[in-house]
Amino acid sequence: MPELAQVLRFEGSPDLRPLFLKAVVNGRFASTSVPDTVAERVGVPIDLDHVVDYARVCGFHVGGTLPLTYVHVLAFPLQVALMARRDFPVPLVGLVHVENTIRWTRPVAPTDVLDLRVAATTMRPHRRGRIVDLVSEVTVAGERVWTGVSTYLARGTGDASAPTSEAPDTSALAGLPGGSTWRLPKDTGRRYAAVSGDVNPIHLHSLSARALGFPTAIAHGMFTYAKVIAALGPKVPQAGESHVWFKAPVTLPSTVLLKVSADGQTALVRPAKRDGEHLIVRNTAS
């Protein structure tokens, strides 16, 4: 996190609907650097009813620890609060989540009280436009227990020579028989938006998605990723790193297939009836 930064302190979770509306009004900017700003909430208790609602939508079993991806839902409104500001260099509406990394030192307990801090740290070229990283840090009583790096793409003029993060080769995994089939109905984006607060129009309805350049509504990447983590269950380590590459959007409605390696470390979500990759997950223990 930037040491000398403007700090935006929030007593409660920012309301995302007016922030997305504000982002539409603010429009597009040409800056090439991210603002030196940190958004934070301190002393955040866990709302168990919200955890249950999130778990139901994403397929988790509710237990003595929070779902690994749930903490992202708490940090995401702070991300939006930064990205909706006029000094943010790319437009919030239409951003595509292309990659995410979570590192954690232990499971987060429902009794933990969290301090959340979010900052934008990197803006760099991409072959399809520009990408920016939003880093979320979560501490409990001064101990950093969870860090998330969300990488977003602002589509536009790209740089074919820009370096890219390489996902694991899943060709062998894709060829294995079996797997779990998921049917994702057309209201999937609206159901996840209700528990995550992510009301980006590209996820909510085909009409709003088309207005932003998508053929139809697409599933939230963090929803599909959460379903993978939920399906892996005890195969997810107690401490480590989870990296997801969002390769191609899941249009809604869709039927997709989950394939998991024998060691449970690598997972692939692909179209059920054709070749392709929607997302790839790699988990490693620390």
Image: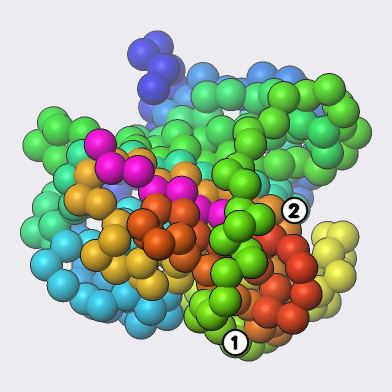
Judged left or right of residue 241, residue 256 is right
Q: Which of 197 and 172 lies nearest the eye of the viewer?
A: 172
- Which contiguous range is marked in magenta? 279-286
Residue type marked 2? Gly
* Mark drawn on residue 183: 1
What residue do we see at 84% from left, 22% from top? 161
Q: Main secondary structure of the magenta part?
A: strand
Q: Secondary structure at mark 1?
A: strand
Q: Whole-percent x and y of residue 165?
A: 63, 33
| Residue at image mark 2 | 94
Judged left or right of residue 57, residue 140 is left
Kindly report the distance in space between the C-alpha atoms of the residues bearing marks 1 and 2.
25 Å
Residue type marked 1? Arg
Dot 1: few (<14), some (14–19), or many (≥20) neighbours within 10 Å?
few
Q: Which of 94 and 272 lies nearest the eye of the viewer?
A: 272
Is 250 covered by the magenta stretch?
A: no
| Residue 264 visible in the current orientation | yes
